Amino acid sequence: MPETQTRQVVELGYAGSERLVMNMGPQHPSAHGVFRMLLTLEGETVVAMDAIIGYLHRCHEKLGETLTYVQYPSIASKTDYVAAMTSELAYVSAVEALGTFEVPRRAQYLRVLVAELQRIASHCLWLGTWCMDMGGALGGGATVFLYCFREREEVLDRLEELTGARLLYGFHQVGGTRYDVPAGWDRKVRDTVAFIERRIDEWEAMLEDNAVFRVRTQGVGVVSRELAQEVGIAGPLLRGSGVDFDLRRDAPYSSYGDFRFRVPVEAAGDCYARYRVRMVEFRESIRIARQVLDGLPEGPISSRPGVKSVGQVRVPKGEAYARVEGARGEVGCYIVSDGGPRPYRMKWRGASFSNLAVLPHIIPGHKVADVVAIMGSVDPVFGEVDR
Amino acid sequence: MTAADAAARIRERFGVEAVVEGSSVTAVLPRERWQEAGGVARRELGCAFFNWLSAVDWKERGLEVVCRVDNLDARLGLTLRTRLDAGAPRCPTLTGVWRGADWMERECYDMFGVVFEGHPDLRRILLSEDWEGHPLRKDYAVDTPHTPYR
Protein backbone atom coordinates (compact mmCIF):
# COMPACT_ATOMS: atom_id res chain seq x y z
CA MET A 1 0.00 0.00 0.00
CA PRO A 2 1.47 3.37 -0.92
CA GLU A 3 2.53 5.52 1.97
CA THR A 4 -0.02 8.24 1.22
CA GLN A 5 -2.97 5.98 1.91
CA THR A 6 -1.71 4.42 5.09
CA ARG A 7 -1.53 7.86 6.59
CA GLN A 8 -5.24 8.47 5.97
CA VAL A 9 -6.45 5.26 7.58
CA VAL A 10 -8.98 5.96 10.29
CA GLU A 11 -9.09 3.50 13.15
CA LEU A 12 -12.64 2.40 13.86
CA GLY A 13 -12.03 -0.22 16.48
CA TYR A 14 -12.64 -3.05 14.05
CA ALA A 15 -11.72 -6.38 15.52
CA GLY A 16 -11.13 -8.15 12.21
CA SER A 17 -7.74 -8.73 10.76
CA GLU A 18 -7.88 -8.06 7.06
CA ARG A 19 -7.74 -4.84 5.10
CA LEU A 20 -8.47 -4.72 1.42
CA VAL A 21 -7.65 -1.92 -0.96
CA MET A 22 -10.31 -1.70 -3.63
CA ASN A 23 -10.04 0.37 -6.74
CA MET A 24 -13.22 2.07 -7.89
CA GLY A 25 -13.14 3.77 -11.25
CA PRO A 26 -11.95 5.58 -13.24
CA GLN A 27 -14.62 4.19 -15.58
CA HIS A 28 -17.25 3.45 -12.97
CA PRO A 29 -20.80 4.26 -14.08
CA SER A 30 -21.52 6.16 -10.88
CA ALA A 31 -18.51 8.41 -11.36
CA HIS A 32 -20.46 10.63 -13.78
CA GLY A 33 -17.22 11.21 -15.59
CA VAL A 34 -13.77 9.91 -14.98
CA PHE A 35 -12.94 9.60 -11.33
CA ARG A 36 -10.98 7.04 -9.40
CA MET A 37 -11.20 6.17 -5.75
CA LEU A 38 -8.91 3.92 -3.78
CA LEU A 39 -10.98 2.56 -0.96
CA THR A 40 -9.41 0.78 1.98
CA LEU A 41 -11.96 -1.66 3.32
CA GLU A 42 -12.49 -3.63 6.45
CA GLY A 43 -15.23 -5.99 5.49
CA GLU A 44 -17.88 -3.80 3.88
CA THR A 45 -16.79 -0.69 5.70
CA VAL A 46 -14.60 1.95 4.13
CA VAL A 47 -11.86 3.02 6.50
CA ALA A 48 -9.86 5.25 4.16
CA MET A 49 -10.31 6.83 0.81
CA ASP A 50 -7.96 8.44 -1.64
CA ALA A 51 -9.46 10.39 -4.53
CA ILE A 52 -7.59 10.48 -7.82
CA ILE A 53 -8.69 13.20 -10.19
CA GLY A 54 -7.27 14.91 -13.25
CA TYR A 55 -8.38 12.52 -15.99
CA LEU A 56 -10.24 15.34 -17.75
CA HIS A 57 -7.60 18.00 -17.18
CA ARG A 58 -7.22 20.28 -20.20
CA CYS A 59 -5.34 23.10 -18.48
CA HIS A 60 -8.10 25.62 -18.96
CA GLU A 61 -6.18 28.21 -17.00
CA LYS A 62 -3.22 28.12 -19.37
CA LEU A 63 -5.63 28.14 -22.29
CA GLY A 64 -7.24 31.23 -20.81
CA GLU A 65 -3.88 33.01 -20.96
CA THR A 66 -3.51 32.28 -24.67
CA LEU A 67 -7.04 33.22 -25.81
CA THR A 68 -8.43 36.75 -25.95
CA TYR A 69 -11.41 38.07 -24.02
CA VAL A 70 -13.48 37.67 -27.18
CA GLN A 71 -12.42 34.09 -27.80
CA TYR A 72 -12.51 32.53 -24.38
CA PRO A 73 -16.22 32.75 -23.32
CA SER A 74 -17.22 29.92 -25.64
CA ILE A 75 -14.37 27.82 -24.22
CA ALA A 76 -15.45 28.68 -20.67
CA SER A 77 -18.60 26.67 -21.25
CA LYS A 78 -16.43 23.56 -21.49
CA THR A 79 -15.34 23.69 -17.86
CA ASP A 80 -18.72 22.69 -16.45
CA TYR A 81 -20.41 21.26 -19.51
CA VAL A 82 -23.58 20.32 -17.64
CA ALA A 83 -24.19 23.95 -16.66
CA ALA A 84 -22.28 25.77 -19.36
CA MET A 85 -24.15 29.06 -18.99
CA THR A 86 -22.77 29.51 -15.48
CA SER A 87 -19.09 29.40 -16.28
CA GLU A 88 -19.52 31.65 -19.32
CA LEU A 89 -21.25 34.17 -17.10
CA ALA A 90 -18.51 33.99 -14.46
CA TYR A 91 -15.84 34.69 -17.05
CA VAL A 92 -17.57 37.62 -18.75
CA SER A 93 -18.51 39.06 -15.35
CA ALA A 94 -14.85 39.07 -14.33
CA VAL A 95 -13.86 40.84 -17.56
CA GLU A 96 -16.67 43.34 -17.13
CA ALA A 97 -15.57 44.00 -13.55
CA LEU A 98 -12.05 44.77 -14.78
CA GLY A 99 -13.03 47.17 -17.52
CA THR A 100 -15.88 49.59 -17.91
CA PHE A 101 -18.51 47.76 -19.88
CA GLU A 102 -22.13 48.64 -19.71
CA VAL A 103 -24.46 45.68 -19.88
CA PRO A 104 -27.98 46.55 -21.09
CA ARG A 105 -30.88 45.66 -18.83
CA ARG A 106 -32.39 43.28 -21.35
CA ALA A 107 -29.12 41.35 -21.48
CA GLN A 108 -29.00 41.22 -17.67
CA TYR A 109 -32.50 39.74 -17.60
CA LEU A 110 -31.66 37.22 -20.29
CA ARG A 111 -28.56 36.18 -18.35
CA VAL A 112 -30.68 35.42 -15.30
CA LEU A 113 -33.25 33.57 -17.39
CA VAL A 114 -30.73 31.24 -19.01
CA ALA A 115 -28.94 30.74 -15.69
CA GLU A 116 -32.16 29.53 -14.09
CA LEU A 117 -33.14 27.33 -17.04
CA GLN A 118 -29.66 25.88 -16.86
CA ARG A 119 -30.05 25.19 -13.16
CA ILE A 120 -33.27 23.29 -13.86
CA ALA A 121 -31.57 21.22 -16.58
CA SER A 122 -28.57 20.54 -14.39
CA HIS A 123 -30.63 19.50 -11.38
CA CYS A 124 -32.67 17.18 -13.65
CA LEU A 125 -29.47 15.46 -14.69
CA TRP A 126 -28.32 15.22 -11.09
CA LEU A 127 -31.56 13.73 -9.79
CA GLY A 128 -31.84 11.21 -12.60
CA THR A 129 -28.29 9.93 -12.44
CA TRP A 130 -28.19 9.90 -8.67
CA CYS A 131 -31.35 7.82 -8.46
CA MET A 132 -30.01 5.46 -11.08
CA ASP A 133 -26.81 5.07 -9.08
CA MET A 134 -28.86 3.91 -6.16
CA GLY A 135 -30.42 1.59 -8.66
CA GLY A 136 -33.07 -1.04 -8.31
CA ALA A 137 -33.64 -0.05 -4.72
CA LEU A 138 -35.84 2.75 -6.02
CA GLY A 139 -38.43 0.42 -7.46
CA GLY A 140 -37.37 -0.04 -11.01
CA GLY A 141 -33.86 1.06 -11.81
CA ALA A 142 -33.93 3.65 -14.51
CA THR A 143 -37.43 5.03 -13.98
CA VAL A 144 -36.50 8.30 -12.33
CA PHE A 145 -33.51 8.64 -14.63
CA LEU A 146 -35.65 8.48 -17.76
CA TYR A 147 -38.28 10.79 -16.33
CA CYS A 148 -35.66 13.38 -15.50
CA PHE A 149 -34.04 13.12 -18.89
CA ARG A 150 -37.36 13.64 -20.60
CA GLU A 151 -37.83 16.88 -18.67
CA ARG A 152 -34.24 17.97 -19.22
CA GLU A 153 -34.64 17.51 -22.96
CA GLU A 154 -37.44 20.08 -22.92
CA VAL A 155 -35.14 22.66 -21.35
CA LEU A 156 -32.33 21.83 -23.75
CA ASP A 157 -34.75 22.26 -26.65
CA ARG A 158 -35.52 25.78 -25.43
CA LEU A 159 -31.83 26.61 -25.11
CA GLU A 160 -31.23 25.17 -28.56
CA GLU A 161 -33.91 27.44 -29.99
CA LEU A 162 -32.20 30.36 -28.31
CA THR A 163 -28.55 29.66 -29.10
CA GLY A 164 -28.45 26.86 -31.66
CA ALA A 165 -26.64 24.55 -29.26
CA ARG A 166 -27.77 22.04 -26.69
CA LEU A 167 -24.85 21.85 -24.30
CA LEU A 168 -22.09 24.37 -25.01
CA TYR A 169 -23.74 27.63 -25.83
CA GLY A 170 -21.42 30.57 -26.34
CA PHE A 171 -24.36 32.70 -25.27
CA HIS A 172 -22.60 35.28 -23.14
CA GLN A 173 -20.14 37.84 -24.39
CA VAL A 174 -18.42 40.77 -22.78
CA GLY A 175 -20.95 43.60 -22.67
CA GLY A 176 -24.11 41.54 -23.14
CA THR A 177 -25.42 38.41 -24.80
CA ARG A 178 -25.01 37.17 -28.33
CA TYR A 179 -28.56 36.08 -29.08
CA ASP A 180 -31.96 37.60 -28.56
CA VAL A 181 -35.07 35.53 -27.96
CA PRO A 182 -36.78 34.19 -31.07
CA ALA A 183 -40.45 35.00 -31.74
CA GLY A 184 -42.88 33.02 -29.62
CA TRP A 185 -40.10 31.63 -27.43
CA ASP A 186 -41.36 33.01 -24.15
CA ARG A 187 -44.64 31.12 -24.58
CA LYS A 188 -42.71 27.89 -25.04
CA VAL A 189 -40.56 28.56 -21.98
CA ARG A 190 -43.67 29.15 -19.89
CA ASP A 191 -45.14 25.87 -21.09
CA THR A 192 -41.89 24.04 -20.37
CA VAL A 193 -41.55 25.29 -16.81
CA ALA A 194 -45.24 24.59 -16.14
CA PHE A 195 -44.72 21.05 -17.40
CA ILE A 196 -41.65 20.54 -15.22
CA GLU A 197 -43.35 22.03 -12.18
CA ARG A 198 -46.00 19.31 -12.34
CA ARG A 199 -43.32 16.65 -12.73
CA ILE A 200 -41.46 17.76 -9.63
CA ASP A 201 -44.47 16.77 -7.53
CA GLU A 202 -44.40 13.38 -9.21
CA TRP A 203 -40.71 12.83 -8.50
CA GLU A 204 -41.14 13.82 -4.90
CA ALA A 205 -44.06 11.44 -4.47
CA MET A 206 -42.05 8.64 -6.05
CA LEU A 207 -39.00 9.19 -3.89
CA GLU A 208 -40.11 10.54 -0.56
CA ASP A 209 -42.77 7.91 -0.03
CA ASN A 210 -40.20 5.24 -0.79
CA ALA A 211 -38.80 3.76 2.41
CA VAL A 212 -35.73 2.43 0.63
CA PHE A 213 -34.86 5.87 -0.72
CA ARG A 214 -35.13 7.37 2.74
CA VAL A 215 -32.99 4.69 4.34
CA ARG A 216 -30.31 5.12 1.72
CA THR A 217 -30.16 8.90 2.03
CA GLN A 218 -31.16 9.93 5.55
CA GLY A 219 -28.25 10.09 7.95
CA VAL A 220 -25.84 9.09 5.16
CA GLY A 221 -22.85 11.26 4.27
CA VAL A 222 -23.33 13.90 6.94
CA VAL A 223 -21.30 17.07 6.40
CA SER A 224 -21.17 19.26 9.49
CA ARG A 225 -21.60 23.00 9.22
CA GLU A 226 -18.01 23.50 10.25
CA LEU A 227 -16.53 20.99 7.80
CA ALA A 228 -18.66 22.40 5.00
CA GLN A 229 -17.16 25.85 5.41
CA GLU A 230 -13.63 24.69 6.08
CA VAL A 231 -13.48 22.69 2.87
CA GLY A 232 -15.31 25.41 1.00
CA ILE A 233 -18.16 23.33 -0.39
CA ALA A 234 -20.80 25.53 -1.92
CA GLY A 235 -24.28 25.72 -3.32
CA PRO A 236 -26.84 23.06 -2.41
CA LEU A 237 -24.26 21.18 -0.32
CA LEU A 238 -23.50 24.19 1.81
CA ARG A 239 -27.16 25.01 2.26
CA GLY A 240 -27.85 21.34 3.02
CA SER A 241 -25.42 21.68 5.92
CA GLY A 242 -27.30 24.54 7.51
CA VAL A 243 -25.39 27.52 6.13
CA ASP A 244 -27.79 30.14 4.85
CA PHE A 245 -25.79 31.54 1.99
CA ASP A 246 -26.67 32.06 -1.67
CA LEU A 247 -24.73 34.45 -3.87
CA ARG A 248 -27.85 35.34 -5.82
CA ARG A 249 -29.31 36.84 -2.67
CA ASP A 250 -26.25 37.75 -0.60
CA ALA A 251 -24.02 39.22 -3.29
CA PRO A 252 -26.47 39.90 -6.13
CA TYR A 253 -24.93 40.01 -9.59
CA SER A 254 -26.49 40.64 -12.99
CA SER A 255 -30.15 41.50 -12.24
CA TYR A 256 -30.88 39.09 -9.37
CA GLY A 257 -31.72 42.03 -7.14
CA ASP A 258 -34.93 42.53 -9.15
CA PHE A 259 -36.44 39.12 -8.41
CA ARG A 260 -38.06 37.54 -5.40
CA PHE A 261 -37.12 34.00 -4.44
CA ARG A 262 -36.54 31.86 -1.39
CA VAL A 263 -33.23 30.27 -0.40
CA PRO A 264 -33.82 26.77 1.00
CA VAL A 265 -31.70 25.67 3.95
CA GLU A 266 -31.64 22.25 5.60
CA ALA A 267 -29.82 21.56 8.83
CA ALA A 268 -29.26 17.80 8.66
CA GLY A 269 -26.26 17.84 6.29
CA ASP A 270 -26.99 14.36 4.92
CA CYS A 271 -27.79 13.19 1.39
CA TYR A 272 -31.48 13.69 2.01
CA ALA A 273 -30.95 17.31 3.08
CA ARG A 274 -29.01 18.04 -0.11
CA TYR A 275 -31.80 16.39 -2.08
CA ARG A 276 -34.43 18.57 -0.38
CA VAL A 277 -32.46 21.76 -1.05
CA ARG A 278 -32.27 20.98 -4.75
CA MET A 279 -35.95 20.08 -4.99
CA VAL A 280 -36.88 23.48 -3.59
CA GLU A 281 -34.36 25.14 -5.88
CA PHE A 282 -36.16 23.62 -8.87
CA ARG A 283 -39.30 25.48 -7.90
CA GLU A 284 -37.51 28.70 -7.07
CA SER A 285 -35.75 28.64 -10.44
CA ILE A 286 -39.09 28.27 -12.15
CA ARG A 287 -40.38 31.18 -10.11
CA ILE A 288 -37.45 33.38 -11.14
CA ALA A 289 -37.78 32.36 -14.80
CA ARG A 290 -41.43 33.43 -14.77
CA GLN A 291 -40.57 36.78 -13.20
CA VAL A 292 -37.92 37.39 -15.86
CA LEU A 293 -40.38 36.66 -18.64
CA ASP A 294 -42.97 38.93 -17.05
CA GLY A 295 -40.60 41.83 -16.74
CA LEU A 296 -38.28 41.37 -19.72
CA PRO A 297 -37.38 44.93 -20.79
CA GLU A 298 -37.10 46.01 -24.41
CA GLY A 299 -33.83 47.29 -25.76
CA PRO A 300 -30.46 46.15 -27.05
CA ILE A 301 -28.84 42.92 -25.88
CA SER A 302 -25.26 44.09 -26.04
CA SER A 303 -23.43 47.36 -25.53
CA ARG A 304 -20.73 46.40 -28.00
CA PRO A 305 -20.96 46.21 -31.77
CA GLY A 306 -20.38 42.87 -33.47
CA VAL A 307 -16.96 41.33 -33.24
CA LYS A 308 -14.59 42.52 -35.94
CA SER A 309 -11.34 41.23 -34.51
CA VAL A 310 -10.43 38.89 -31.70
CA GLY A 311 -8.36 41.54 -29.94
CA GLN A 312 -11.24 44.00 -29.86
CA VAL A 313 -11.92 43.84 -26.13
CA ARG A 314 -9.25 45.37 -23.94
CA VAL A 315 -9.31 46.02 -20.25
CA PRO A 316 -7.01 48.16 -18.12
CA LYS A 317 -4.29 46.73 -15.92
CA GLY A 318 -5.61 45.23 -12.73
CA GLU A 319 -7.35 42.20 -11.35
CA ALA A 320 -10.87 41.10 -10.54
CA TYR A 321 -12.67 38.16 -9.02
CA ALA A 322 -16.24 37.56 -10.15
CA ARG A 323 -18.44 34.79 -8.82
CA VAL A 324 -21.85 33.45 -9.64
CA GLU A 325 -24.12 30.90 -8.02
CA GLY A 326 -24.05 27.92 -10.35
CA ALA A 327 -26.07 24.74 -10.06
CA ARG A 328 -23.26 23.29 -7.95
CA GLY A 329 -22.36 26.41 -6.01
CA GLU A 330 -19.92 29.24 -6.26
CA VAL A 331 -18.27 29.37 -9.68
CA GLY A 332 -15.64 32.06 -9.65
CA CYS A 333 -13.21 33.48 -12.13
CA TYR A 334 -10.13 35.42 -11.06
CA ILE A 335 -8.45 37.43 -13.81
CA VAL A 336 -5.21 39.38 -13.69
CA SER A 337 -4.83 41.76 -16.61
CA ASP A 338 -1.68 43.43 -17.88
CA GLY A 339 -3.63 45.67 -20.25
CA GLY A 340 -3.38 43.34 -23.24
CA PRO A 341 -6.16 41.61 -25.18
CA ARG A 342 -5.83 38.42 -23.12
CA PRO A 343 -5.53 37.76 -19.39
CA TYR A 344 -2.11 37.60 -17.78
CA ARG A 345 -3.47 34.98 -15.40
CA MET A 346 -6.86 33.36 -15.17
CA LYS A 347 -7.98 31.12 -12.34
CA TRP A 348 -11.15 29.07 -12.14
CA ARG A 349 -12.75 28.42 -8.81
CA GLY A 350 -14.71 25.35 -9.82
CA ALA A 351 -17.54 24.48 -7.47
CA SER A 352 -17.19 20.76 -8.15
CA PHE A 353 -13.49 20.73 -7.22
CA SER A 354 -14.17 22.04 -3.72
CA ASN A 355 -17.32 19.96 -3.36
CA LEU A 356 -15.49 16.79 -4.26
CA ALA A 357 -12.72 17.57 -1.77
CA VAL A 358 -15.15 16.85 1.04
CA LEU A 359 -15.45 13.16 0.10
CA PRO A 360 -12.29 11.91 1.88
CA HIS A 361 -13.62 13.55 5.04
CA ILE A 362 -17.09 11.98 5.01
CA ILE A 363 -16.80 8.61 3.28
CA PRO A 364 -14.69 6.69 5.88
CA GLY A 365 -17.05 4.85 8.19
CA HIS A 366 -19.68 4.17 5.53
CA LYS A 367 -20.41 0.97 3.64
CA VAL A 368 -19.22 0.61 0.05
CA ALA A 369 -22.78 0.88 -1.25
CA ASP A 370 -23.15 4.26 0.45
CA VAL A 371 -20.11 5.62 -1.38
CA VAL A 372 -22.16 5.76 -4.56
CA ALA A 373 -25.08 7.47 -2.85
CA ILE A 374 -22.81 10.04 -1.22
CA MET A 375 -20.89 10.81 -4.38
CA GLY A 376 -24.10 11.24 -6.35
CA SER A 377 -25.44 13.65 -3.74
CA VAL A 378 -22.34 15.81 -4.20
CA ASP A 379 -23.18 16.13 -7.93
CA PRO A 380 -19.64 16.55 -9.26
CA VAL A 381 -19.04 17.40 -12.91
CA PHE A 382 -15.56 16.31 -13.79
CA GLY A 383 -15.02 18.86 -16.46
CA GLU A 384 -15.14 21.41 -13.68
CA VAL A 385 -13.16 19.37 -11.17
CA ASP A 386 -10.26 18.82 -13.54
CA ARG A 387 -10.63 21.89 -15.72
CA MET B 1 -17.53 42.56 11.47
CA THR B 2 -17.51 44.90 8.50
CA ALA B 3 -14.85 45.13 5.81
CA ALA B 4 -13.52 48.32 7.43
CA ASP B 5 -13.24 46.61 10.84
CA ALA B 6 -11.41 43.67 9.29
CA ALA B 7 -9.01 45.97 7.45
CA ALA B 8 -8.32 47.93 10.63
CA ARG B 9 -7.63 44.69 12.53
CA ILE B 10 -5.16 43.53 9.88
CA ARG B 11 -3.36 46.88 9.80
CA GLU B 12 -3.03 46.99 13.55
CA ARG B 13 -1.97 43.35 13.87
CA PHE B 14 0.46 43.05 10.96
CA GLY B 15 1.40 46.62 10.12
CA VAL B 16 0.56 46.11 6.44
CA GLU B 17 -1.81 47.95 4.14
CA ALA B 18 -5.29 46.45 3.78
CA VAL B 19 -7.41 47.67 0.88
CA VAL B 20 -11.18 47.75 1.23
CA GLU B 21 -13.28 47.40 -1.89
CA GLY B 22 -16.99 46.98 -1.30
CA SER B 23 -17.38 44.03 1.06
CA SER B 24 -13.95 42.58 0.41
CA VAL B 25 -10.53 43.25 1.89
CA THR B 26 -7.16 42.57 0.30
CA ALA B 27 -3.92 42.43 2.29
CA VAL B 28 -0.36 41.60 1.28
CA LEU B 29 1.53 39.81 4.02
CA PRO B 30 5.13 38.81 4.53
CA ARG B 31 5.71 35.13 3.94
CA GLU B 32 6.87 34.55 7.52
CA ARG B 33 3.52 35.63 8.91
CA TRP B 34 1.36 33.73 6.38
CA GLN B 35 0.14 31.05 8.78
CA GLU B 36 -0.38 33.57 11.55
CA ALA B 37 -2.48 35.67 9.18
CA GLY B 38 -4.54 32.61 8.30
CA GLY B 39 -5.17 31.96 11.97
CA VAL B 40 -6.21 35.56 12.58
CA ALA B 41 -8.54 35.47 9.55
CA ARG B 42 -10.16 32.28 10.76
CA ARG B 43 -10.47 32.99 14.47
CA GLU B 44 -10.65 36.76 14.80
CA LEU B 45 -12.24 37.82 11.51
CA GLY B 46 -14.59 34.82 11.37
CA CYS B 47 -13.50 33.74 7.89
CA ALA B 48 -14.47 30.08 8.32
CA PHE B 49 -15.17 29.52 4.62
CA PHE B 50 -12.10 28.53 2.63
CA ASN B 51 -12.85 29.65 -0.90
CA TRP B 52 -9.75 29.10 -3.05
CA LEU B 53 -5.98 29.35 -3.15
CA SER B 54 -3.76 29.81 -6.14
CA ALA B 55 -0.71 31.70 -7.39
CA VAL B 56 0.35 34.26 -9.96
CA ASP B 57 3.72 34.07 -11.69
CA TRP B 58 5.28 37.54 -11.89
CA LYS B 59 8.29 36.18 -13.82
CA GLU B 60 11.59 37.56 -12.44
CA ARG B 61 9.73 39.11 -9.49
CA GLY B 62 8.79 35.66 -8.27
CA LEU B 63 5.54 33.90 -7.50
CA GLU B 64 2.73 35.31 -5.45
CA VAL B 65 0.31 33.07 -3.56
CA VAL B 66 -3.27 34.35 -3.44
CA CYS B 67 -5.84 32.97 -1.02
CA ARG B 68 -9.49 33.91 -0.76
CA VAL B 69 -11.54 33.18 2.35
CA ASP B 70 -14.99 34.36 3.37
CA ASN B 71 -16.98 35.17 6.46
CA LEU B 72 -20.37 34.03 5.20
CA ASP B 73 -22.33 35.38 8.15
CA ALA B 74 -20.94 38.90 7.77
CA ARG B 75 -20.80 38.66 3.94
CA LEU B 76 -17.14 39.57 4.13
CA GLY B 77 -14.49 38.42 1.65
CA LEU B 78 -10.80 38.45 2.49
CA THR B 79 -8.00 38.03 -0.04
CA LEU B 80 -4.57 37.29 1.44
CA ARG B 81 -1.48 37.53 -0.73
CA THR B 82 2.15 36.81 -0.14
CA ARG B 83 5.21 37.13 -2.35
CA LEU B 84 7.62 34.20 -2.48
CA ASP B 85 11.34 34.43 -3.13
CA ALA B 86 12.21 34.19 -6.82
CA GLY B 87 13.74 30.85 -7.67
CA ALA B 88 12.76 29.05 -4.48
CA PRO B 89 8.99 29.06 -4.23
CA ARG B 90 8.33 27.85 -0.71
CA CYS B 91 5.30 28.82 1.31
CA PRO B 92 3.98 27.73 4.72
CA THR B 93 0.88 25.57 4.51
CA LEU B 94 -2.60 26.66 5.60
CA THR B 95 -3.87 23.09 6.01
CA GLY B 96 -3.66 23.47 9.78
CA VAL B 97 -6.07 26.39 9.64
CA TRP B 98 -8.56 25.20 7.03
CA ARG B 99 -8.76 21.55 5.97
CA GLY B 100 -9.88 22.72 2.53
CA ALA B 101 -6.41 24.09 1.85
CA ASP B 102 -5.28 20.50 1.24
CA TRP B 103 -6.45 20.08 -2.37
CA MET B 104 -5.98 23.73 -3.29
CA GLU B 105 -2.35 23.67 -2.21
CA ARG B 106 -1.79 20.41 -4.03
CA GLU B 107 -3.16 22.01 -7.19
CA CYS B 108 -0.95 25.06 -6.68
CA TYR B 109 2.08 22.78 -6.24
CA ASP B 110 1.10 20.86 -9.34
CA MET B 111 0.65 23.94 -11.53
CA PHE B 112 3.30 26.30 -10.11
CA GLY B 113 5.71 24.11 -8.17
CA VAL B 114 5.12 25.99 -4.94
CA VAL B 115 6.30 23.78 -2.08
CA PHE B 116 3.91 24.15 0.84
CA GLU B 117 5.97 23.52 3.93
CA GLY B 118 4.18 21.34 6.43
CA HIS B 119 1.53 20.06 4.01
CA PRO B 120 0.69 16.48 5.05
CA ASP B 121 0.38 15.02 1.57
CA LEU B 122 1.97 17.26 -1.04
CA ARG B 123 1.81 15.49 -4.40
CA ARG B 124 0.44 16.30 -7.82
CA ILE B 125 -3.32 16.28 -8.09
CA LEU B 126 -4.40 17.00 -11.68
CA LEU B 127 -1.33 15.93 -13.65
CA SER B 128 0.27 12.53 -13.46
CA GLU B 129 3.09 11.92 -11.01
CA ASP B 130 5.70 11.72 -13.78
CA TRP B 131 4.78 15.02 -15.46
CA GLU B 132 7.73 17.30 -16.07
CA GLY B 133 7.50 20.96 -15.13
CA HIS B 134 4.71 23.11 -13.78
CA PRO B 135 2.46 24.30 -16.62
CA LEU B 136 1.15 27.58 -15.24
CA ARG B 137 4.63 29.01 -14.76
CA LYS B 138 5.33 31.66 -17.35
CA ASP B 139 8.61 29.97 -18.33
CA TYR B 140 6.89 26.66 -19.08
CA ALA B 141 7.44 25.89 -22.74
CA VAL B 142 3.95 25.24 -24.07
CA ASP B 143 5.22 24.25 -27.50
CA THR B 144 7.55 21.52 -26.26
CA PRO B 145 6.34 18.28 -27.77
CA HIS B 146 5.41 15.71 -25.16
CA THR B 147 5.44 12.05 -25.97
CA PRO B 148 1.86 10.92 -26.19
CA TYR B 149 2.56 7.60 -24.48
CA ARG B 150 4.62 6.95 -21.42
Image: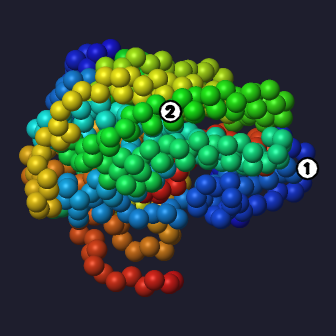
Residue A213 or residue A300, whichever sits in front = A300
Q: CA distance from mark 2 to mark 1?
A: 58 Å
- Residue A347 can be seen, yes or no: no
**Mark 2 chain:** A
**Quadrant of the snapshot with the C terminus of chain A:** bottom left
According to the picture, the residue beneath numbered tag 2 turns out to be A191
Applied colour scheme: rainbow
In the image, A36 versus A159, the foreground residue is: A159
Q: Amino acid at mark 1?
A: Gly
Question: Could you say which disc has been placed on residue A178 in the image?
Answer: none
Residue A89 image point, x, y percent: 32, 42
Instruction: Identify the residue at image location x=30%, y=63%.
Output: A63
> Which x, y percent locates residue A328?
49, 39
Q: Residue at x 28, y 71 (%)?
A: B140
On the image, the x and y values in percent for residue A46 come to 77, 48
Q: Which residue is painted at 37% across and 55% down in the image?
A: A164
Q: Secondary structure at mark 1?
A: loop
Q: Quadrant of the N terminus of chain A?
A: bottom right
Q: Chain of mark 1?
A: A
Q: Residues within 10 Å of mark 2 (few under 14, many from 20)?
A: few
Is label 2 or label 1 in front?
A: 2
Res. A264 visible in picture: yes
Residue holding disc 1: A16
Q: Amino acid at mark 2?
A: Asp
Could you tell me which secondary element the residue under label 2 belongs to?
helix
Q: Is residue A44 left or right of residue B48?
A: right
Would you place residue A286 above or below residue A145 in this image? above
Local packing at callout 1 (Cα closer than 10 Å; few below 14, some 14-19, many 20+) is: few
